Amino acid sequence: MTLDVARIRKDFPILDRRVRGGRPLIYLDSANTSQKPRQVIDAISGFYERHNANIHRATHELSEEATAAYEGARIKVAGFVGARDESEIIFTKNISEAINLVAYSMSNASAGAPAPDRFRLGPGDEIVVTEMEHHSDLVPWQLLCQRTGATLRWFSVTPEGRLDLSGLDGLINERTKLVALVHQSNVLGTVNPVRLIADRAHAVGALVLADAAQSVPHMPVDVRDLGADFVGFTGHKMCGPTGIGVLWARRELLDEMPPFLGGGEMIETVWMDHSTFAPPPHKFEAGTMPIAEAAGLAAAIDYLNETGRESIHAHEQALLGDALTQLTGIDGLRILGPTEPEDRGTAISFEVDGVHPHDVSQVLDELGIAVRAGHHCAWPLHRALGVQASTRASFYLYNTHEEVTALIDGIRQAQKFFGVN
Amino acid sequence: MQIQSLYQEIILDHYRNPHHKGLREPFDVEVHHVNPTCGDEVTLRVALKDVGGDPVVTDVSYDSLGCSISQASASVMSDLVIGKPVSEAMRILQEFLDLMQSKGQAEPDEAVLEDAVAFAGVSKYPARIKCALLGWMAWKDATGQALDETTGQAS
């Protein structure tokens, strides 16, 4: 089914904004954070106006409603990504916290918390990542290696922006305890073959974590088909609010893993000198959680489901094809990553000869076009590609072909302004 | 376009033809600063000379990668501080910092800031202030270290 973009745009109040002295907003920064439809905004304000209470800990009616909203969101998320049941869904504040949860749980196991050996790391063990990771899926593993004495290794990236899998069997070996990789790169748009890598990792007994922050918002993702043991994503990139992220993990792993944060609601019993812990998912949710945000995330999932995830994906692929064709037609512009839409998402990073990304984005901003400039939290990737920084345009369900053309015109204006071409 | 207030012709001139770019000998201290949001970087060298108890900036040179604002700012900064007593150069730095925090409301003093008055427009763009300050902060750091070394040797 074709997406009715004009109707969709009416759902997003911010798209009526004028910026920089009256220019209509052209928002091409959804890989950074997406805009929110009225339905999500209403769900959050509706929660605060009618149902606000803390969850799981009071017997009054409002608390029952708030608990139903929060746990209902968990069921919705479970269905959205194909979890076996909602106990496999842990809410966090964002995907960075979701990844850190796994890293710190393994760290706690390594420091002596009761857990099976597969969660313990020490000298001689290896963690494998890729050169195209967001800092969120790199730095936590660097820190874990630092704490445990394990060694960090990584897949390199080809000049075309794909993972170099030629050394797969050597890189993932019997010393590997965990493989962490991005499903869809936030810089290159590249969609990685998670299943292929996960199969190799599982063959040597390693765990696999997939960073799905950029894929879940844009295409149907089934966590069990993906093949990873842990999958993280975040609400604010999928039309939901900031402040809520998700970790999905296989239930048997969650049962065995030590807790990450200690506090209220994650316990079973507490004595002065020790505690026992609640079963998953609550074992990993200490303290008051983002309750209104969960209500907002549930509304975002409803919105994406009702709009149709396949239709959204098809529309984005059409925008992507258009953008790639037009961008490659600009002299002096180089796209980082695949230049064909196959196995590729809608984040397009590029450099323009003679014009620094900050300056490109400043000229675009002047025209009302919001993009991102910098290394997009993927500094090692930029270094590997021999690029200091880049400009990134990213598209979502509410973007149009006219906006793609506006981007192209804007880049040409930047070239003209700085005396290139 | 409003953007002309940001990209003054003086800034674009310094960007295209930066002054004092390229690392030079002799120097007392070399520092490397980065802007972590974009990866822009500068390696900057400072040479000081003690003239009757009052250190003077005898040379500043740098190598850098970055946007027009950060490149031009390093160029203008070097012009301003080379040959000046450190105490006076620090006053100019303070004047430039005040200008950057002015949100476009300040009337910069051209007698003090010379070409740096062209950066007044940058103060209206919060995301770009760090770009304009990259070279200045590297110079401040290097000069501070050079002064510490001088003091250290004296005691």
Image (cartoon, coloured by chain):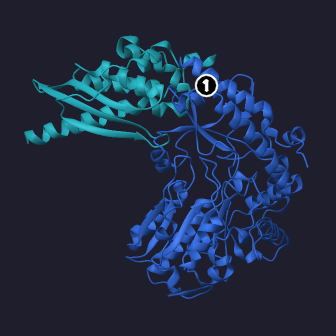
Chain colours: A blue, B cyan
Residue A249, percent from left and from top = 66, 74
Tell which of B99 and A145 is nearer to you: A145
> For the view shown, which residue lies furthest in the front direction?
A166
Residue B29 makes an appearance in the image: yes
For the point 71% across and 75% down, the residue is A88
Residue B132, percent from left and from top = 44, 28
Q: Is residue A262 above or below residue A21?
A: below
Residue A318, percent from left and from top = 79, 42
Determine whether the residue tagged by mark 1 lies in a helix, strand or loop: helix
Tell which of B14 and A66 is nearer to you: B14
How many tags in the picture?
1
| Quarter occupied by residue A75 | bottom right
Residue A367 makes an appearance in the image: no
Q: In this view, does A329 lie above or below A173?
A: above
> For the view shown, which residue lies furthest in the top direction?
B111
Q: Is residue A202 above or below residue A330?
A: below
Q: Which chain carries label 1?
A: A
Residue A208, percent from left and from top = 58, 71
Tell which of A138 and B48 is nearer to you: A138
Task: Classify the position of the C terminus of chain A by image quarter.
Answer: top right
Q: How crowded is mark 1: few (under 14 residues within 10 Å), some or many (20 or more)?
A: many
Question: What residue sits right under mark 1 in the picture?
Answer: A363
Kind of residue at badge 1: Val
For the point 54% across and 53% down, the residue is A132
Q: In this view, does A147 lie above or below A407?
A: below
Taking the image as shown, residue A98 lies to the left or right of residue A76, namely left
Tell which of A387 and A139 is nearer to you: A387
Taking the image as shown, residue A215 lies to the left or right of residue B136, namely right
For the point 56% across and 17% down, the residue is B5
